[in-house]
Structures are given as structure tokens and as C-alpha cells.
């Protein structure tokens, strides 16, 4: 399926211009973009639901817009955002409706039709639901059923508008997995739009960015991440960053000028929850000493934290230790996350010793720690760390019902330095 | 040669019948031809032409004479007619259908075309309207068993009866209620095997079409469409004909006509003698703020003219009713001497004032000369048409009828 | 459930036809009734009476089936459980056109009295006009009640115009028309019924063809288009068929309310389905039966007075509307 210099929109209003892209069979193309950028418009125009305002959409050389409805439906299946008013229909009946372009005037299903319906239900994993009525389905199940309906048309191309919106997290993954399998195993050319940036980057074969009235096609998700224009299209004032390594989205730290400083000693994945919590808590966070092949390093870098690092597979050097010491001692809050310790990062324990001997307070977070470090002030979880000012970590503990007495948190009021041992 | 010709001419001329007189020749020839000009319901016109030839002039004398003149049977009503033949009667009903009435036992005449043949007197009639019942009730005085000839009435409990006898007969089952006039129970109707159904009808009437389909014999009575009071009542002759009471019908009508004319004479004579002012009348009804008045050509208006009174809406050239605006009504009726409200739904002056607040200032209201219909006006008021007319006269000229209280109107 | 319902419905329809033929003011022995239904002519009075009842029954069957199918189509098309030819004002529009034709037409000498073909055409045009107005206005008001309000508005407008027409004629006509505008089978005539019957049957057959696209439209216009349905053609076709059906019914009996509303709901309740291929024809069946039974009630409840049919259908119609509205608004 090919769009050539397509202009798409409604009536006279052009939403997108100069669109040229290709939807390949056997590949999953995911369309992302900020709200109201025209993703739906693009998909509907590709599906033949909307007339192109300029340019053409071709399927196997034929213009989609000029095809007769029946013919087009046999090539292209579409799943839109509208919910059908078919509460009393069974799943089998709904999927059966997909045979519309193949059946006669009374929509009687031949054995061939039934075969297609069966197949569609199998592929989407809803066969066991065949007799259930639509009202009895969960959102995720319903979405799969609607996809099955489109599949029953036996199309070469499947176009879906926001198939994962309004679904809970596990269902989103389910649907995305299904779409990817449809592409790779059934050989259908699938193109869908989504708000889930991370899912798009993970599942898609091709990424299409829709923004500012036009479209940019990335042949690989990695290309998208590497393109600053991509992140720029989403962020409002650059508050997120994309990690090319982890293909994950991180919130960039943007501390206020007078923000208190925190220093985190971590590693092997124990760091990120603390990094994020402290950033949310309003701290300017730094980390160290982290090896450059440590996941904590990547996350910290993605979040824009200052990191004291060490080369991969090298024990922590004196220089790194000294730098870390300098940083930590200048911070208002020092946190240790009990990472697994081995010969290469035992230097961090020495760092802690030094800090303690300087009289600085070091918090230890980790209820499931496997060893102890004497002298640390231990808390069970991130929530119990002292947070600057009135700001609390957004994951609040469950409060008892209001009984008339004012709830006072367990955390001391911190006016600045955590060196004040008297509090 | 020329002399011989001349001689021959003169000779021939003289030979053509001449009286010999000294110096003059007169030839007279008379040819008479009689032509029948036309024959109508009421007269036969004949024209005789006589040709007399007197030299040199031909005198033609034409004489037209009415050889036969018959009194028209129906003199006021315009929507039906009666024609008498040898042993049969031809009636034209409200839809101009020709109905041949033949006395029971006698055979129908050969060459008379008719839409319907009815043997009279009927034995199982069905009547649609209370007005038909009123006429039959009037005839009952002179033919007490007349109701035996009626099998059913289309009543459907749609109105109240003022004919006690009729109500009793229905209750006792002697008269069958066949359902409402606009939707009768055809099964019941057919089971009565009527030999005559008297209906009123209009364009597109489903009841009449159904009767046609069922081949039930029906005649159309359109008395309510007549524009004179006597014309309305003259339909008693129509009804009487079917019950074999032709003479009774004619005589009752003559009686009513006489009383009508006498009332009218009394009024006009008194007006002249006593130099009475002309009385102005407004005749109207009001429903939910909309005012309907009788037309200037309606029977109501004509009755008022016959009493030498002035009708407030005489320029509305309609025979039925018309709707007028409030302003129009106030403009014309505020100075009327008498107000007649043509409905029984408004039962007091308060109710009237509620509908038309301005009416409180009207002359007739201030002088207490406002009347409304009595509920029995359609039934008893029609049966006793001369009484209705007398009521009207007494309302317009109370000083001329001091002892009379209206029966069919109620003072508000 | 489905297995039992499908044979029971036609059987009960036959039963109601028998009831209709056997009920009336005049006693006719059952054998004659059954004989009459099977085509054997009884003698004398019985023949006439049976014929009277038969024409009413056939009229009720045609009218009720038309209304049932039309109601099913309208409810699916507008995705509104309260849609019904009467409620949407389509019946009123149809009867306005017929009234205008009857009163004005005969007055101007265009048609001679009760010409069923001419009246059908007029009625169909009137029904179509209102249907299209409803379709146009419904795109502005997407809510369920909004559509009903539009319909009620149009219905009132049509009724007001009809009343205006009628009021300018004479009193008798007014009485008769007022009765007619609430629907009646009392004046059913073979000439009218046999003229309208083929049109009604034809329209019912066409309504079966509309079922497939209506099913597609349940998924939304865009999805339906993606399935290969031609949305605009389907809508126009459905509206046209519904208008034709309503017009058939109105010509035969005058506008009757609530059958178009209740029949599809009854079918949905019994069969628990949304499939128009079943709902449309079965609504016709149920509608026919409701009409026949309503006619029997209308002529027997207050004999010899005859009730207008809508008075009877309101007895089950009004509560149905109430229940539906309450359900929509979440009141149990």
C-alpha cells in the first residue's frame, strides 16, 4: 500500500500534506504523534474512508479511493475508534459481519466464509469466547474481537486507529503482540496509531511520525530515537528524553535553581526508582560511582543526572572515588541503595566509609537488602526518605480515615542540610 | 310571344285562389305549427306559430302558451327534489342520486332510470343523525307506529337524547344502537338487514364507500347544508316519502310554513306600526379563543333577515360558518342589541367574559340580552322549527312577544 | 429460546387471525368462520359478516406488518430504541399528505373520492418528506431523546397543518378525520386493501434486503464503509423502504401508533439478538399480530362504539416508552 504525495483532511480543511509512505505486507508500521496531529485523518484516508484532498493512495497499483466498496473491503480492513452498538451480538456474529464484502444480499455464510471466521478468531485468540455476548467482554477482549472482525475480511492490509487507547496495561501489550504477530506470521500489512511511545518503539518495524502537518517515516525505531526532531515533536519544553539503548522514555530532571542536592550510590538496577523519586521530590540528583555498562548509568544519563562514572569492567579508580566524594559531601542528602557488590565496585563501600567518617548522614534504602553497612540510617522504602520542603513523594502511603486529628508525617521538617543531627 | 307569356303569368296568378273583388286581389293561406318548447318539473311550454299570407305580405303570428302547470313540490329546499309519476315517486337526494320509490306490492315502472329503488313504506330503516330522528318524531304524531319501521340508529352514545321515547326504545332494545356515525358497527348494521339507511355524508366519506361496498341501500340527507330555515325543515317531505307519509309530510310542512310566515308578518307589521328601531344581532361561538360566526348567507342570517333585523356579519358571503378575528368581532358586535352564543358549552356570562374579556363592554351584555343554545336545540329545536323561529323573534323583539319564553335558547 | 420462538410466532399469528374472524357483534358459528377462512362461502348474513371481519383482518395484517418492519428499520437506522413511525412524526406527515390530497384534491377535482393509488403516492411522499427531515435534523441532535423530540415536533407540525386543513372543511368531516387520524380498521374496503397489499408485500420483501447494510451500520458509518457497505445508499434505501411501508399502513388504516415501537422490542426481547436479518421480518410478524389483536379489542371493548386503534395500542405502547426511557437514564 502506497501513499504518494497525499494531502489528507476533511472537506476543504487540509490536515496533512506531502505525505508519501509505504505500508509493507508482513511488517507492523506504527504511527505516533502528538494529539490532534492528524493520525486518524491519515489512517482513514489510507483506508479509503476519507477522500484524499490531493495525491493518491494505491493498493497493488489501484487507487483506493476509486475502488468499489466491496472490492476495497476485500483488500483493506479497518478498525476505528467507534464502539459498535451491537450489545446483543455474539462474538461469532460480530466476527461473521467481517465477511460482508464476500456474502450475498442476505449475508448467508458459506463454508468458506465460516472457515475465514474461524481462522480470524483463532489468530486473535477469541475462539473460546465465540458464544459470549459483546456486553460480557472486557475492553481487551472486545478490541481483539473487533480486530478479528476486520481480519475476517481476509484483507491484505489492516489499518487500526488507536487500538490500545482505553485499554489497561496488560491488554495493551496483548493487542500490540497480536498486531505484530499478524504482520510477521500472517503476512498482513498492519499500520496502527498509538499514544504509547515506548510500545511503538518496541513493537514497530517502521515508525511514522505525524506532526506539524506532515509525516516523517523511520525505517527502524532506532532511527526515530536518534532523531532529535522525533523527541522534539512530543515534548513540551523538553521534559522527556529517549534512551537509544533502552528505547525508553525518561523524564528529564529539571531542578529549580535553589533545589537541594541529592547523591545516590547504587548499581545494577537498584538506582532508577530512587533517582526518579528524588527527582520528583524536587532534588537535583547526582549519582556515582557507576560503571558505564550498568543500567543505572544509562537511566541516569537519560534522566540528565550528573554521573561519576567508571569504565566498564574496571574497578573503581581513585580518581572516580575522589570525584564522588566531592559531590556527595556537597549534597544535602546521600542515599545508598544496597546494590550487589563485587570486586569491581567495592570501591563504593569505601566511599560510604569515608562519608560516614566525615560525619555525614547516609540513608540506606532497601528492605530486601542482603547485607548491612554499619552507620547508615536505614529506611524500608523510598517513601520514607526525607523530602525537601513540603513536597512528598507522589506514591503516598495509605492514609487512615480522617478522624479529626491532623496527620503528622514521620519525616522531620528539613530546612536544608541533612547534617543537622539534632532533628 | 311576349303577350302570351304575360297573359299566362297573370292567369296563373289569378288562378291561385283569389277572391274576385272589384280592383283588389287577396290571397289568404294559414299554416299552423305547434312546437313543444320544453317540459320541466313544473310546467309544459308549447309554442304555436301561425302563418297567414295576405298579398303582398306574410303575417306571422307566434303564440306561446303554458299548456300544463304543476306546483313544485319542494319550494324552499335546494338540495333535494320530488317528482310524482304514475304509481311511483322519483326523489333526488343530497348527492343528486335518483331514487325510485315504489309502493310495496306494486311493480316498478319500466323505463324509469334510477340509482336506487326503494319499496315504501320502509320496514327496517336505519338513521344516522339525531336530526333524522327529529323529523321522524314529528311525523310520529300522525303515525304512531312509525318507529316500528325503524330498526336502528347510529348513536354510539355520542350525545344526550332529548327524545324520551327514542331513548326508552334504545334501552329496551326495540331500536338497535349501531355505533357512532363516523364509525358504525357494520356487522350489526348488516345483521339488521336494513331496507334503507339515511345518512349525511361528505367528500371522501369512508362510511359511504363502505356502504357502497356492502351494497346496503342508502340515501343522503343534506338538510344541514340548506341555507334557509324552511329549506331545512322541508326535508320532512323527503323523510315522509320513505315512510309512505307523503301527504302528512306536506301538510306538516304547510303548517310550519304558515306559522313561520305569520310570525314574520307580525314582526314586520309591528315594526312599521310602532316605528321600531332595527335590531342588530350577532350570532357566534367561541372555543379556546377562536371566534366562529354564522355566515351572512346561512340559514341563521336568513332567518334574521326574515325578521327584519340586521345581522352583524351579513357581508360574510358564506352559507356555513366562518372564523373571524377578535378585533373584527369586537368592531361589529359591540353595538349589537342581541348576542346569541351558538353553543351550550358556555353556561354563564362569567365563562363568556373569560373567553372574550372585551365582551363585558358590549351593548347586549350591558342590557342583558345575551342568549345561548339550549342543549336540546339540535333535536327538539329542529323538530319544532316554527318554535325555534318564534324563540328567535321573541329574543329580538321581546316587547312583541311578552308572554313567550324561549325553549331552545337560554338567557345568560 | 430461539428454537421455540421461531415456530410459535407464526402459529400465534394464525390464532389471532382466527380470533379476529370469529369475534364480533353478530354471532357466527365457528365452522362457518373456519370455512370462510379456507375459502368456502357461507350463506347469507354469515357470509357478509365474515367478509366484513376478513377485510379488517387482512387490513390489520398488512398495516401491522408494515409498521413492524418500518419500526425495526428506523430503530436500527437511528440507533434509537424510541424510534417508531408515529413517534418520529412520519405517520403524521403521511396522513397530512393524504388529508391534503383528499380535501384539496377532491375539491380541485384532481382525484375522485377515495382513490387508493393516488393516496398511497401522496402518503409515501409525505412520509418520505418527514423521514428526510428527521434524518437531516438527527445529524444535528445525536442524543436519543433529541431525535424523539425532533420527531414529536414534526409530528405536531404535521398534525397542526392537518387540523388546519380539516377545520376549513365542515364539521362532519372534522369528526370523521379526527377519528381517522388515530387509526381505524372499521372502514376497511377490499378495493383499498387489495390495491395496497401488493405494494406492502413488495416493500416488505425489499426491507429484507436492507437488513444486511443496517447490520453494517450498527458498527458505525466509518466501519461500515470499510466493510464495503455504501453508507449513503443504504441510508437512503432504508429510509425509502420505511417511508413506503408507513405509507401503506396509513392509506389502509390511518396512522397507528406504537406498533412500530413495540414489535421490534418484543422481538429483541424474545430472541436476544441485534441481527436485523431476523429482527426486520419477525417485527413484521409481531406487528401484524399486534395490529390484529388491537383491532379485535378496538371493536369489542366498548361495542357498539368503536375505539380508535391508537387508543388501544397506547395501552401497551405508553408503558413501553416509559420503561425504555427509564432504562436509558439508568433508573431501575
Image (cartoon, grey):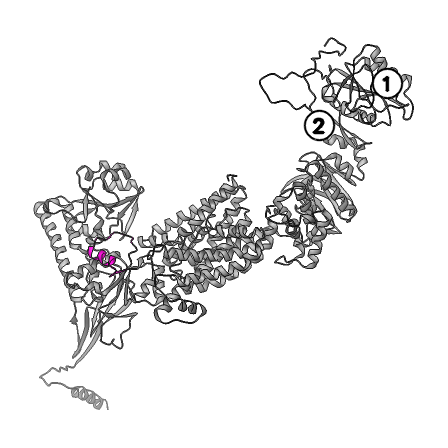
Q: Chain of mark 1?
A: A
Do the residues indicated by labels 2 and 1 lie within the same chain of the protein? yes
Q: Helix, strand, or loop for circle 1?
A: helix
| Residue at image mark 2 | A236
Label whose residue precedes the other's in the sequence (2 or 1): 2
Q: Is residue B163 magenta?
A: yes
Please state which of the two labelled residues, at mark 2 or mark 1, is closer to the viewer. Answer: 1
> Circle 2 marks a residue in which chain?
A
Look at mark 1 in the image and give the residue it sits on: A349
Q: Secondary structure at mark 2?
A: loop
Taking the magenta stretch, the answer to whether it contains residue B254 is: no
Disc 2 from disc 1: Cα separation: 40 Å
Closer to the camera, A3 or C12? C12
- The image position of residue A163, as x and y in percent, is 69, 41
10 Å crowding of disc 2: few (<14), some (14-19), many (20+): few
Residue that extends furthest to the top in the rendered view of this protein = A422
Q: In the image, is residue C234 above or below residue B279?
A: below
Q: Residue at x 87, y 16 (%)?
A: A350
Residue B259 drawn above or below residue B364: below
> Is residue B230 shown left or right of residue A337?
left
Q: Residues within 10 Å of mark 1 (few under 14, many from 20)?
A: some
x, y percent for residue B337? 18, 42
Pick the residue in front: C61 or B15.
C61
State the extent of the magenta-drawn residues as a range. B157-176
Image spot of residue B61 (x, y percent): 16, 74
- In the image, is C221 to the left or to the right of B47? right
Amino acid at each position: 500500500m502506497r501513499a504518494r504525495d497525499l494531502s489528507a483532511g476533511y472537506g476543504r480543511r487540509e490536515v496533512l500534506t506531502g505525505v508519501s509512505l509505504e505500508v509493507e505486507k508482513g511488517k507492523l508500521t506504527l504511527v505516533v504523534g502528538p494529539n490532534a496531529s492528524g493520525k486518524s485523518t491519515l489512517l482513514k484516508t489510507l483506508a479509503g474512508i476519507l477522500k484524499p484532498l490531493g495525491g493518491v493512495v494505491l493498493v497493488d497499483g489501484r487507487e483506493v479511493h476509486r475502488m468499489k466498496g466491496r472490492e476495497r473491503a476485500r483488500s483493506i480492513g479497518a478498525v476505528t475508534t467507534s464502539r459498535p452498538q451491537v450489545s446483543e451480538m455474539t462474538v461469532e456474529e460480530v466476527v461473521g459481519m467481517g465477511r460482508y464484502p464476500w456474502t450475498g444480499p442476505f449475508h448467508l455464510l458459506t463454508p468458506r466464509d465460516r472457515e475465514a471466521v474461524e481462522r480470524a478468531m483463532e489468530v486473535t485468540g477469541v475462539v473460546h469466547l465465540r458464544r459470549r455476548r459483546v456486553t460480557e467482554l472486557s475492553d481487551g477482549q472486545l478490541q481483539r474481537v473487533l480486530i478479528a472482525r476486520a481480519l475476517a475480511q481476509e484483507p491484505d492490509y489492516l489499518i487500526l486507529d488507536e487500538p490500545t487507547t482505553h485499554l489497561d496495561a496488560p491488554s495493551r501489550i496483548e493487542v500490540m503482540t497480536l498486531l505484530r504477530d499478524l504482520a510477521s506470521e500472517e503476512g498482513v500489512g498492519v499500520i496502527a496509531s498509538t499514544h504509547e511511545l515506548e510500545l511503538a518503539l518496541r513493537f514497530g518495524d517502521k515508525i511514522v511520525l505525524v506532526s506539524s502537518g506532515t509525516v516523517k517515516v523511520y525505517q527502524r525505531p532506532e532511527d526515530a530515537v536518534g532523531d532529535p526532531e522525533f523527541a522534539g515533536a512530543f515534548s513540551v519544553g523538553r521534559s522527556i528524553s529517549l534512551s537509544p539503548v533502552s528505547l525508553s522514555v525518561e523524564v528529564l530532571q529539571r531542578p529549580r535553581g535553589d533545589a537541594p542536592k541529592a547523591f545516590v550510590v547504587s548499581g545494577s538496577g537498584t538506582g532508577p526508582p530512587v533517582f526518579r523519586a528524588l527527582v520528583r521530590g524536587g532534588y537535583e540528583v547526582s549519582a556515582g560511582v557507576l560503571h558505564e555498562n550498568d543500567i543505572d548509568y544509562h537511566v541516569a544519563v537519560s534522566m540528565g543526572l550528573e554521573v561519576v562514572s567508571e569504565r566498564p569492567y574496571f574497578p573503581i579508580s581513585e580518581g572516580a572515588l575522589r570525584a564522588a566524594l566531592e559531590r556527595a559531601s556537597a549534597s544535602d542528602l546521600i542515599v545508598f541503595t544496597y546494590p550487589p557488590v563485587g570486586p569491581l565496585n567495592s570501591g563504593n563501600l569505601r566511599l560510604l566509609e569515608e562519608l560516614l567518617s566525615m560525619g555525614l548522614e547516609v540513608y540506606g534504602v532497601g528492605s530486601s537488602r542482603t547485607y548491612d553497612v554499619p552507620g547508615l540510617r536505614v529506611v524500608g522504602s523510598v517513601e520514607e526518605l526525607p523530602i525537601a520542603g513540603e513536597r512528598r513523594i507522589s506514591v503516598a502511603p495509605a492514609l487512615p480515615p480522617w478522624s479529626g486529628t491532623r496527620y503528622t508525617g514521620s519525616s522531620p521538617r528539613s530546612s536544608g542540610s541533612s547534617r543537622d543531627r539534632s532533628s | 310571344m311576349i303577350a302570351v307569356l304575360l297573359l299566362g303569368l297573370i292567369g296563373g296568378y289569378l288562378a291561385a285562389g283569389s277572391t274576385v273583388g272589384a280592383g283588389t286581389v287577396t290571397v289568404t293561406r294559414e299554416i299552423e305549427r305547434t312546437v313543444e318548447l320544453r317540459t320541466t318539473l313544473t310546467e309544459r311550454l308549447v309554442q304555436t306559430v301561425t302563418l297567414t299570407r295576405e298579398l303582398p305580405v306574410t303575417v306571422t303570428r307566434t303564440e306561446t302558451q303554458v299548456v300544463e302547470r304543476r306546483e313544485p313540490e319542494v319550494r324552499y329546499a335546494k338540495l333535494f327534489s320530488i317528482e310524482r309519476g304514475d304509481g311511483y315517486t322519483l326523489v333526488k337526494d343530497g348527492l343528486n342520486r335518483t331514487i325510485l320509490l315504489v309502493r310495496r306490492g306494486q311493480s316498478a315502472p319500466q323505463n324509469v332510470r334510477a340509482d336506487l329503488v326503494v319499496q315504501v313504506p320502509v320496514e327496517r330503516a336505519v338513521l344516522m343523525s339525531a336530526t333524522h330522528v327529529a323529523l321522524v318524531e314529528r311525523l310520529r304524531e300522525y303515525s304512531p307506529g312509525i318507529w316500528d319501521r325503524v330498526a336502528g340508529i347510529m348513536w354510539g352514545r355520542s350525545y344526550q337524547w332529548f327524545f324520551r321515547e327514542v331513548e326508552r326504545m334504545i334501552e329496551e332494545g326495540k331500536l338497535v344502537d349501531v355505533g357512532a356515525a363516523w364509525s358504525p358497527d357494520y356487522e350489526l348494521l348488516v345483521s339488521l338487514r336494513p331496507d334503507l339507511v339515511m345518512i349525511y355524508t361528505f367528500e371522501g366519506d369512508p362510511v359511504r364507500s363502505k356502504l357502497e361496498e356492502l351494497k346496503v341501500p342508502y340515501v343522503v340527507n343534506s338538510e344541514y347544508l340548506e341555507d334557509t330555515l324552511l329549506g331545512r325543515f322541508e326535508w320532512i317531505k323527503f323523510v315522509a316519502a320513505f315512510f309512505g307519509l307523503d301527504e302528512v309530510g306536506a301538510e306538516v310542512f304547510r303548517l310550519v310554513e304558515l306559522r313561520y310566515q305569520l310570525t314574520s308578518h307580525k314582526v314586520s307589521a309591528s315594526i312599521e306600526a310602532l316605528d321600531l328601531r332595527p335590531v342588530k344581532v350577532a350570532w357566534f361561538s367561541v372555543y379556546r379563543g377562536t371566534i366562529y360566526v354564522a355566515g351572512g348567507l346561512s340559514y341563521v342570517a336568513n332567518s334574521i333577515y326574515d325578521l327584519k333585523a340586521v345581522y352583524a356579519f351579513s357581508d360574510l358571503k358564506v352559507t356555513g360558518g366562518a372564523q373571524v378575528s377578535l378585533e373584527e368581532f369586537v368592531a361589529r358586535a359591540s353595538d349589537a342589541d342581541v348576542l346569541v352564543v351558538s353553543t351550550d358549552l358556555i353556561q354563564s356570562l362569567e365563562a363568556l367574559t373569560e373567553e372574550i374579556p372585551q365582551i363585558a363592554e358590549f351593548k347586549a351584555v350591558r342590557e342583558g340580552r345575551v342568549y345561548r343554545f339550549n342543549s336540546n336545540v339540535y333535536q327538539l329545536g329542529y323538530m319544532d322549527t316554527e318554535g325555534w323561529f318564534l324563540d328567535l323573534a321573541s329574543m329580538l323583539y321581546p316587547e312583541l312577544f311578552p308572554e313567550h319564553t324561549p325553549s331552545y335558547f337560554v338567557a345568560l | 429460546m430461539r428454537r421455540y420462538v421461531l415456530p410459535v410466532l407464526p402459529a400465534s399469528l394464525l390464532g389471532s387471525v382466527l380470533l379476529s374472524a370469529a369475534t364480533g357483534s353478530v354471532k357466527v358459528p365457528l365452522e362457518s368462520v373456519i370455512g370462510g377462512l379456507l375459502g368456502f362461502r357461507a350463506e347469507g348474513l354469515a357470509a357478509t359478516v365474515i367478509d366484513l371481519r376478513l377485510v379488517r383482518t387482512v387490513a390489520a395484517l398488512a398495516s401491522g406488518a408494515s409498521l413492524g418492519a418500518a419500526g425495526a428499520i428506523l430503530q436500527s437506522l437511528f440507533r434509537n430504541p424510541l424510534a417508531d413511525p408515529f413517534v418520529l412524526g412520519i405517520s403524521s406527515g403521511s396522513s397530512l399528505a393524504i388529508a391534503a390530497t383528499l380535501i384539496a384534491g377532491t375539491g380541485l377535482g384532481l382525484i375522485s373520492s377515495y382513490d387508493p393509488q393516488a393516496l398511497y403516492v401522496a402518503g409515501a411522499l409525505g412520509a418520505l418528506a418527514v423521514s428526510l427531515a428527521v434524518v437531516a435534523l438527527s445529524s444535528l441532535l445525536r442524543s436519543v431523546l433529541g431525535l424523539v423530540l425532533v420527531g414529536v415536533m414534526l409530528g405536531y407540525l404535521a398534525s397542526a397543518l392537518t387540523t388546519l386543513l380539516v377545520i376549513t372543511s365542515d364539521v362532519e368531516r372534522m369528526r370523521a378525520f379526527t377519528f381517522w387520524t388515530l387509526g381505524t380498521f372499521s372502514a376497511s374496503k377490499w378495493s383499498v386493501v387489495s390495491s395496497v397489499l401488493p405494494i406492502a408485500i413488495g416493500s416488505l420483501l425489499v426491507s429484507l434486503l436492507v437488513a444486511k447494510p443496517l447490520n453494517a451500520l450498527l458498527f458505525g458509518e466509518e466501519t461500515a464503509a470499510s466493510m464495503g457497505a455504501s453508507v449513503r445508499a443504504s441510508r437512503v434505501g432504508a429510509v425509502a423502504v420505511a417511508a413506503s411501508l408507513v405509507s401503506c399502513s396509513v392509506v389502509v388504516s390511518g396512522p397507528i401508533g406504537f406498533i412500530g415501537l413495540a414489535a421490534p422490542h418484543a422481538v429483541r426481547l424474545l430472541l436476544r439478538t441485534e441481527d436485523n436479518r431476523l429482527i426486520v421480518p419477525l417485527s413484521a410478524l409481531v406487528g401484524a399480530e399486534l395490529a390484529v389483536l388491537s383491532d379485535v379489542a378496538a371493536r369489542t371493548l366498548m361495542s357498539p362504539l368503536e375505539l380508535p386503534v391508537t387508543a388501544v395500542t397506547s395501552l401497551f405502547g405508553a408503558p413501553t416508552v416509559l420503561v425504555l426511557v427509564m432504562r436509558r437514564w439508568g433508573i431501575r
